[in-house]
Amino acid sequence: MATSTSLRPIDERELVRVITEAAESATPLEIAGAGSKRIVGHPMQTSATISTRAMRGITLYEPTEMVMSARAGTPVAQIEMELADRGQMLAFEPADLGPLLGEDAAQATIGGVFATNTSGSRRVAVGGARDHLLGVRAVNGRGEAFKSGGRVMKNVTGYDLCRGLSGSWGTLAVMTEVTFKVLPRPEETTTLVILGLDDEIAVEVLCTAMSSPYEVSGAVHLQAPLASRLEHSALGAQGRSVTALRLENFAKSVAYRGSRLKDELKAYGAIEDLDAANSLAFWGELRRLSVLADSERPVWRVSTTPTAGPKVVAAIAADMECHAFYDWSGGLIWAEVLPASDAGAADIRRVVATHGGHATLVRATPEVRSAVEVFQPMAVGVDVLSRRLKAAFDPAGILNPGRMYRGM
């Protein structure tokens, strides 16, 4: 647990000074943006918190090149507002974990998004956050400022620092500025919905749609207990599972592709359409993970192959009560389980080892997060490499110490 001391450096130079002094005195630091994801990981014993929130502002935006740069503490909401004014967007639609973790929505910073590699439903079509990161400026645990990448996507030889830092949860370096690609916003959005499917059949529908030529940009399935929590009254009141497919692009293209996809899927049952306004509301809810908010039950984030998703959930449900929301065509599972001394970690790790994938405990009490491995345990070779990276970037071990793995 961190102390109340909070540091908000206003620029990279001040951040270098703060980290250099901390490294010299071996002072452990919590690294945060807005703090919307700060309870993910093992509880840490730190002496101060460094927040990047004072380092904010868009430093470059070239709409014709579809490239933007922003300081790490810039709110995602500000970036998306600027992009929307020019008909563009963050294509990977970063998920907002704030409500899931008991925080307000729309607080995340762009540095926090890339540091945690947080991606939403469109990842299945366009890739994750790290795939859109072109360049980064950062300060490592030695207090050294460095930069990697640039304004264009290139193949590189050697180690890709952008990809290495994305998903490191602030344990290797503190990002000060990020450069990323953006894409045009779709002209039209529609959603095809099938109600009442069981998990196996629903994932079969999702995979069939994703393998079709109709450019599906979102493929999700919510079991009935979670679907009933949807704010979208027309869906939430049904008391049935919801399987949904998103189609986007130009209006004529969406209409044509929707019609053809309906024909292909008609054997699975009645298919309803959500118009643009209802589609945006529905996918906005999923992006905020609203069906998992307002609860203290533990939540696991399980990544596996789409076809293995229903098997993973069924195996977990055989050992404990489990409510699931499938994203990424079944390859990402948000699993809500009943409270237990280990949040079901032993059984879930066994299931994942059997069927493949990895699991992260996203929401649990501090006591549980102290007692279990929160992130997926690493294979021996990966563990050795990770420890070498930690030693190279943060030899004093002062940046988010032990947040992801004990002793790192």
Image (tube, helix red, strand yellow):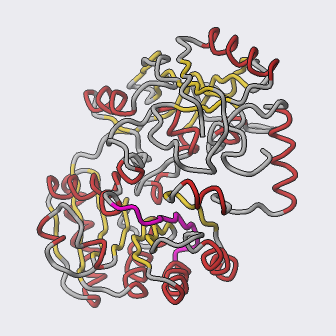
Of residues 315 and 138, the one nearer the viewer is: 315
Residue 364 screen position, x and y as percent: 51, 59
Residue 219, above or below 355: above
Residue 262, above or below 254: below
Residue 285 screen position, x and y as percent: 27, 55
Give the quadrant of the C terminus.
top right
The answer to whether residue 297 is magenta is yes
Residue 90, above or below 321: above
Give the quadrant of the N terminus.
top right
Left or right of 350 on screen, residue 214? left
Q: Tell me the magenta residue range.
A: 295-306
Name the residue: 66% across, 33% down: 46
Left or right of 336 on screen, residue 8? right
Name the residue: 28% across, 79% down: 224
Q: Quadrant of residue 217?
A: bottom left
Left or right of 194 on screen, residue 404? right
The answer to whether residue 78 is magenta is no
Residue 116 screen position, x and y as percent: 56, 44
Left or right of 58 on screen, residue 252? left
Of residues 368 and 39, the one nearer the viewer is: 368
Picture mark count: 0
